Amino acid sequence: AQSVTQLGSHVSVSEGALVLLRCNYSSSVPPYLFWYVQYPNQGLQLLLKYTTGATLVKGINGFEAEFKKSETSFHLTKPSAHMSDAAEYFCAVSNFGNEKLTFGTGTRLTIIP
Amino acid sequence: DTEVTQTPKHLVMGMTNKKSLKCEQHMGHRAMYWYKQKAKKPPELMFVYSYEKLSINESVPSRFSPECPNSSLLNLHLHALQPEDSALYLCASSPADRVGNTIYFGEGSWLTVV
């Protein structure tokens, strides 16, 4: 079985400040990990993903995430928040041979001007 | 072109109506999905088609009936829905040619059942 836990349903940061969204996973086999963003009234857009190889993954819009197996974590960061980053962020996991994504409960990111 | 197109964007239907949601992709993807998303919740998987065959049905009520006419199209037929079925319905696709494929989502169809 696989699962994802996102700590913090709401995160607020000031414009220009560091963004840190937390994601911990549980998986019995090596996981494939994803971060998706959902802007209001829109579908989901892939920010970045980890499958194999380099554990620091860079994505779109200046976001990056680091896969830490020892901590079962895949936290999302961005050095400097922008107003346009305000959205819902979902961490998700899938397993080998299984295209089924399991989503976390999501984190709503608010940017304070 | 990483685009999944869904129609209609908005649909209001009565509990006795029959309607359909449509989804199309031209990326050559061989897996297609339907997800349901309620407000302030994560998407929940409903169905997966792999190579035009239904491979996953997450115990969805029979009032939802999926159809995959060909590798580019995916439909969701709706009949005798309940108000609690009101939600955003997301279609998605992926290449299905290796593990860890990215799943690409459409903009969704907003369904309101009255």
Image (spheres, coloured by chain):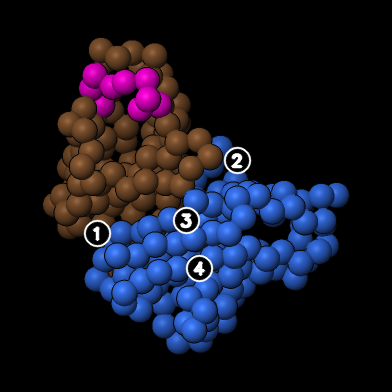
Q: CA distance from mark 3 to mark 1?
A: 25 Å
Chain letter, blue in picture: A
Label 3 SS = loop
State the image coordinates of residue B105 (x, y, percent, origin top left).
42, 51
- Estimate how packed mark 1 is, as few (under 14), some (14 to 19) or many (20 or more) residues with alpha carbons within 10 Å: some
The residue that label 3 is drawn on is: A104
The image quarter containing residue B35 is: top left
Q: Is residue A13 left or right of residue A32?
A: right
Mark nearest the camera among 3 and 2 is 3
Q: Which amino acid is tagged 4?
A: Asn
Q: Gap in Å between the C-alphas at discs 3 and 2?
A: 18 Å
Check disc 1 and report its element: helix, strand or loop. loop
Residue in view at x 45 percent, y 68 percent: A25
Q: Chain of mark 2?
A: A
- Give yes or no for contact between labels 1 and 4 (Cβ–Cβ under 8 Å): no
Check disc 3 and give the amino acid type.
Gly
Q: Image height check: is A52 above or below B3? A: below
* Labels 1 and 4 in the same subunit: no
* Closest to the observer, A91 or A41: A91
* Percent coordinates x, y for residue B87 in the rendering: 42, 31
Residue B55 in the figure: left or right of residue A90: left
Q: Nearer the viewer, mark 2 or mark 1?
A: 2
Q: Which of the marked residues, 2 or 4, is nearer the chain's N terminus?
A: 4
Which colour denotes chain B? brown
Q: Position of residue B17 (x, y in %)?
A: 27, 15
The residue under label 4 is: A24
In which quarter of the view is residue A37 placed? bottom right
Q: Are marks 3 and 2 in contact (CB under 8 Å)?
A: no
Query: At which x and y percent is residue B69?
Result: 17, 42
Query: Which residue does the numbered mark 2 point to in the structure image?
Result: A40
Disc 3 versus disc 1: nearer the observer: 3
Q: Which residue is mark 1?
A: B30
